[in-house]
Amino acid sequence: MPSYAKFMKDLLSRKRKLQEDEIIMLTEDCSAIIQKKVPPKLKDPGSFVIPCEIGNLMVGKALCDLGASINLMPLSIFKRLGIGEVKLTMITLQLADRSVTYPYGVVEDVLVKVDKFIFPADFVVLDMEEDSKVPIILGRPFLATGRALIDVQQGKLMLRVADEKVTFSINEALQHSMDKEDCFRVEMDDSLMLEEMGKYMRKSPLEGALLTEMGAKELSEKVNDEEVVDCVYQLEALKPVFTSKRGVEELNRDEGRMEETSKIELKPLPSHLKYRFLDEQKLNPVIVNNELTSVEE
């Protein structure tokens, strides 16, 4: 029985012809391909992020990056934490776009709380824009301190301290956001509102009486301020004042227009045209054909 390699060589060089019912011995690699024992191709599971706290500040999600040799923290977060002093450093950081930047400094022995564990870590502080979703980066030093085990296929990250361990699932972290949305509800308290309104009214009784929408009787039952109540009574006792100035002005304008129209002189027309008026006062003349009858006009 010829081997697979020699058989293929002879077959391709046409030294051998393929015969029916011939048995060929395959190698292990070829057998695995034919029998579909190759592991299935998977997609990118995404970045591994874990929730963490530093001091009294809930940082949110921290990126676990095996490609980073440092732990990185933005300057804005460092100022909010107010932890220790920054030490000067000669470190030079080369970013992904090959640009070079210099950090603000290094802060040492920062206590990072992850679930029930607390780890000490040194952070490089960089003056950069803070990422709202993943503000800090935990590099290899932190992962080595936490004895991290990462299962990329299952999307799980395990941190261990002595005999205890805690496991984070990247799938659950993506489904359940760490962003907290607070909802506040405010209910109006009538007694508090009336008390504050009474304080304001006592400063200026007349102004308080003008601003309130309540009547004198209702106001006297809810607000203990006699001056304001008296002002409201006095305002309600006043009779409404109506003015006819607008009507007089319109009448004067109409009369002036009538006088101006009456002064218009009619010009003589040719024999085939004549004047006709649209009103009885003969103020609006129109020109029509002289041959029209009264019905046609």
Image (cartoon, rainbow, N blue to C red):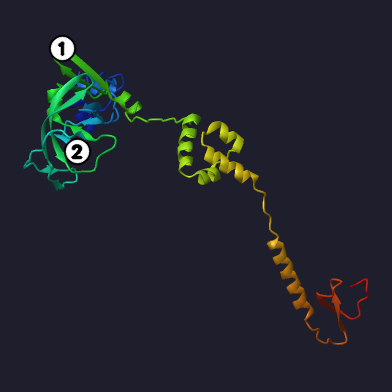
Which image quarter holds the C terminus? Answer: bottom right
Which image quarter holds the N terminus? Answer: top left
* Residue drawn at the location 24% of the way across and 25% of the way down: 152
Name the amino acid, label 2.
Lys
202 w.r.t. 169: above or below: below
On the image, numbered disc 2 is attached to which residue?
A: 79
On the image, numbered disc 1 is attached to which residue?
A: 163
Mark number displayed over residue 203? none
Front residue of 184 and 259:
259
How far apart marks 2 and 1 lie (CA) works out to 36 Å
Name the amino acid, label 1.
Asp
Front residue of 226 and 197:
226
Across and down, in percent, residue 122 comes to: 11, 31
Across and down, in percent, residue 260 comes to: 75, 78
Q: Nearer the viewer, mark 2 or mark 1?
A: 2
Quadrant housing residue 277:
bottom right
**Which residue appears farthest toward the left when viewing the image?**
90
* Residue drawn at the location 87% of the way across and 71% of the way down: 280
Q: How many marks?
A: 2
* Residue drawn at the location 30% of the way across and 30% of the way down: 43
Residue 202 is at least partly visible in this image: yes
* Residue drawn at the location 57% of the way across and 34% of the way down: 220
Residue 27 is at least partly visible in this image: no
Secondary structure state at the residue bearing disc 1: loop
Quadrant housing residue 2:
top left
Secondary structure state at the residue bearing disc 2: helix
- How crowded pointer 2 is (Cα within 10 Å; few <14, some 14-19, many 20+) is rated as few
Front residue of 86 and 42:
86
222 w.r.t. 89: above or below: above
- How crowded pointer 1 is (Cα within 10 Å; few <14, some 14-19, many 20+) is rated as few
The mark that comes first in sequence, 2 or 1, is 2
Drawn side of residue 153 relative to residue 203, left or right:
left
